[in-house]
Amino acid sequence: MEGERGYIIGGVAAASPIWLAPLAGVTTETYRSLHARLGAALVHTEMISAAGLSHKNGKTARMIGGSISIPTVLQLFGPDAETMARGAEVALEIGRFGAMEVNMACPMPKVAKKNGGAAMLYDPAESCRMVAGLKRFGLPVWAKIRKTEPRRHPLSTEDFCAALIEAGTDLIVVHGRTPAQRYDGVSDKGIVTSLAAKFPGMISASGDYYAPDDAKEYLDGGCVSVLAARGAMRDAFLIPKTLFALGFPAEEKYLNMSPADQINLLAETGREAVKAEGERFALVMARKLLTGMLKGVRGAACLREDCASSRDWISLEKTLTAFAEQSEARE
């Protein structure tokens, strides 16, 4: 639904339906801030352990990060409704959020063995209790799920969605791969759009959004929003390109950035990451972002190799600065 402040989706006001998905080890405060600048209308925290929060684990609490200028959704995983509620209570003492989201989609064994993530697809009753238990905090409650498998899971994807909605879920983000697929193969966009038709206003899309046309397919199919995940890593400017292509307001300066400007943006983001998350994370993030920048630019492959060998931020930033200066000289 479109309102005075943009779109009201899942109980949250956002400027557009193009959002940043939660990415484990990636969507820290700095990464979220970067994509807010690039045009994402809403961002997610990393997937955070409700058990870790409830046990006052400092490392887990630091994953929440600080507040930014656009709505942030707290994504939690946990084994049961009680743990989920305790974790949420701690998180809400630390940060401010537009909504809370229960992860019922992560297919990785280290999460599933703790009865979290996609393991919740085997237990619809407890999944619904999680949603109902979080409603008492007064924020919209969302769920992130995957396509279920008839011979593995007790409910079809449609029936699972219906149960979550009956329990009080305000929005369901559906990834069109099964847990067994993990991130291989092709995401089933058809099931996501069929669910959007079945449950109008309730389904957001995740999976295989790598180009503006992918977002358009989801939105044209009735999804209320689309979340950029690995696509935003492959192309750091996927979100502003999508906004422009689909007719939403977009910052023109991010649509055709020169190589030097891209590098300067990366260096600025890296410096912010050093302060907020530490040098080690800044190095990892800069290298990941660099893979999605400088497409077709001469010397980019060598730059990526040089940055991969850097062992501290100072040396990596010097490498970036030298490349930016060379690029400016060639322009």
Image: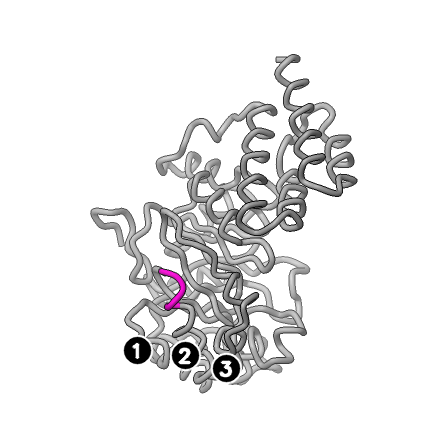
| Quarter location, residue 9 | bottom left
Q: Out of 243 and 323, give the one closest to the viewer.
A: 323
Q: Are marks 2 and 1 in contact (CB under 8 Å)?
A: yes
How far apart marks 1 and 3 lie (CA) works out to 26 Å
| Residue behind mark 2 | 85
1 vs 3, front mark: 1
x 71%, y 30%: residue:
319
Q: Are marks 3 and 2 in contact (CB under 8 Å)?
A: no
| Residue behind mark 1 | 136
Magenta segment range? 92-96
On screen, residue 97 versus residue 20, left or right, reads left
**Neighbours of disc 3 within 10 Å: few (<14), some (14-19), many (20+):** some
Q: Which mark is residue 155?
A: 3
Residue 110 x/y as whole percent = 66, 73
Residue 162 x/y as whole percent = 39, 76
Q: Amino acid type of disc 3?
A: Leu
In the rendered image, the vertical position of residue 169 relative to residue 31, given as above or below:
below
> In the current view of this chain or complex, which residue is farthest to the left?
4
